[in-house]
Amino acid sequence: MLSLRMLPCTLRLNKLMSRAGSDCLCIIDREAVPSELKETFEQHRGFDKSFDSSISCFKAPNVDQPVVYAPVPELTDYDDVRSYQEAAKKSMQKVLKAGFQTPLLYVPKVKRFPQAELCTVLGALEELYVASIIPIQLREAGAPKDTRVTTLSIEIDDPKADEILKEALILEAGRYVARDIGVGDPERMTPIQVERYIKPLFDKLSVTVISDLKVLQKEYPLFAAVNRAAEAVERHRGRIIFLEYKPPKPARKTLMLVGKGVTYDTGGADIKAGGVMAGMSRDKCGAAAAAGFMQVVNELQPDDVHVVAALCMVRNSVGEECYVADEIITSRAGLHVRIGNTDAEGRMCMTDALCRMKEMAVERNLPDPHIFTIATLTGHAFISAGEGQSIAIDNSVAHREDHARRLQAAGQAFGEPFEVSVLRPSDFAFNAGKVIGEDLVQANNAPSVRTPRGHQVPAAFMIMASGLDKHGLDSKLPIKYTHIDIAGSAGEHPAMPTAAPLVSLVKTHLQK
């Protein structure tokens, strides 16, 4: 399986209740301690009041290995399963600092959080990616691995332990791909470099790359506008990468993902000034998450789910060729769009691909289509939801099925929390053309954080500019659409990309 190659270390399930081969034992839950350690834990609590609130490493008389204790904090009513993920991460941090290489993680079963076992394993793997795999550009340069963990053993007291391990392997494979693309620096993950990374991974899927300038200008004109300055530099030239999985049986539904893949965002002519440009290589995490989702699809090979993804890879460069405010550009759907702010490039680079997905759904009569845009789109989403949370916005058709709430429930269960926003008439009115000759205004000239409803308005724009507004509740072919803004959840530099909302999408849409 590809997933076995996409792990930070060897992962094995400890079934024999024997800890041979492990050089330390990691405990994260004060309520889930092996019986032979309970007396030792009580002794430590007797002389160390901070024992259950700080990380420690010690020898115990009844076990052969040192013990790493990274306790889950005392939980309130408002804590979620991320507390277990974070404790698992901290245990691995201590393992690495202490120089251990073959830890055994004792995974707790938690009544309050039924998915804590899987989330704990994923938390540990996430930290080991950070420390052992290292960002792709450094990994490829031959960064030293003398402190890395080579084998992570997990002990799960659950009859479904094998299933949990298998699921962790598959999800981590997708997150691995998403992190690699998301963390790649502006030169390691240029649009063409993303293409080169993607193609060998998905040799069993249909891969179509649109990079010809004339084709982009004719069929994806809003994308081509963003790409205009970058086109002058060969290695920075934009492309849209379509990935398609067709199931072996007749599909019962179709998932269509459009990911924002801005490999570097200077802001364009409306340049990001005052030091806020740093970290903008992360503006491709929407496309990265879509690619990671396709890796999970590649692993699961669902029998009856058809999946298409479009990775909109482009660099928003600045220069004499860059697009500017006041230009009027005709979208693929035939609407005249006046540019208001070149730093609102995310909606530009995705809208024509969104329109193409809509066309595919109609032309092919695809079963039960649901289109998504996934993007680190607005600072407003970060301010509104806070760090660590995504925002889901359904159109009227998806809202009728309460989709965003189902996505939110999955995120809550699996450590990828969502806030849900609702589109209002004012969001569409905001984008309406102001003068003769323009149908839509792409953006105002203020930052989204100073724009009322600054994360809902772009979703309304994409619905209108792509022609999706013609596929509402009372149309001949209603089409579900959900915009996911991951500005708050993608992972702020210098932290690693999180791959959100990959797990939530898998749990909501790939499992019956």
Image (spheres, grey):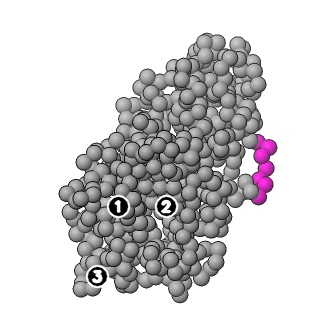
* Residue density around tag 1, few if under 14, some if 14–19, many if 20 or more, within 10 Å: some
Secondary structure under tag 1 reads helix
Question: Which residue corresponds to mark 3?
Answer: 438
Measuring 32% from the left and 54% from the top, which residue is drawn there? 480
Residue furthest out toward the bottom = 320
In the image, taking residue 52 as reference, residue 218 lies left or right, namely left
Expressed as whole percent of the image width and height from the top left, the position of residue 232 reads 59, 82
User: Which amino acid does the dot numbered 3 rest on?
Assistant: Glu
* Residue density around tag 3, few if under 14, some if 14–19, many if 20 or more, within 10 Å: some
User: Which amino acid does the dot numbered 1 rest on?
Assistant: Val
User: Which amino acid does the dot numbered 2 rest on?
Assistant: Ala
Magenta-tinted stretch:
141-147
Q: Nearer the viewer, residue 250 or 69?
A: 250
Measuring 52% from the left and 67% from the top, which residue is drawn there? 240
Question: Which residue corresponds to mark 1?
Answer: 362
Secondary structure under tag 3 reads loop
Do labels 2 and 3 touch, CB within 8 Å?
no
Measuring 62% from the left and 79% from the top, which residue is drawn there? 233
Q: Is residue 95 above or below residue 192?
A: above
Expressed as whole percent of the image width and height from the top left, the position of residue 20 reads 75, 21
Camera-nearest label, 2 or 3: 2
Q: Is residue 184 above or below residue 101?
A: below
Q: Earlier in the sequence, mark 2 or mark 3?
A: 2
Expressed as whole percent of the image width and height from the top left, the position of residue 22 reads 74, 26
Q: CA distance from mark 2 to mark 3?
A: 28 Å
In the image, taking residue 347 as reference, residue 8 lies left or right, namely right
Q: Earlier in the sequence, mark 1 or mark 2?
A: 2
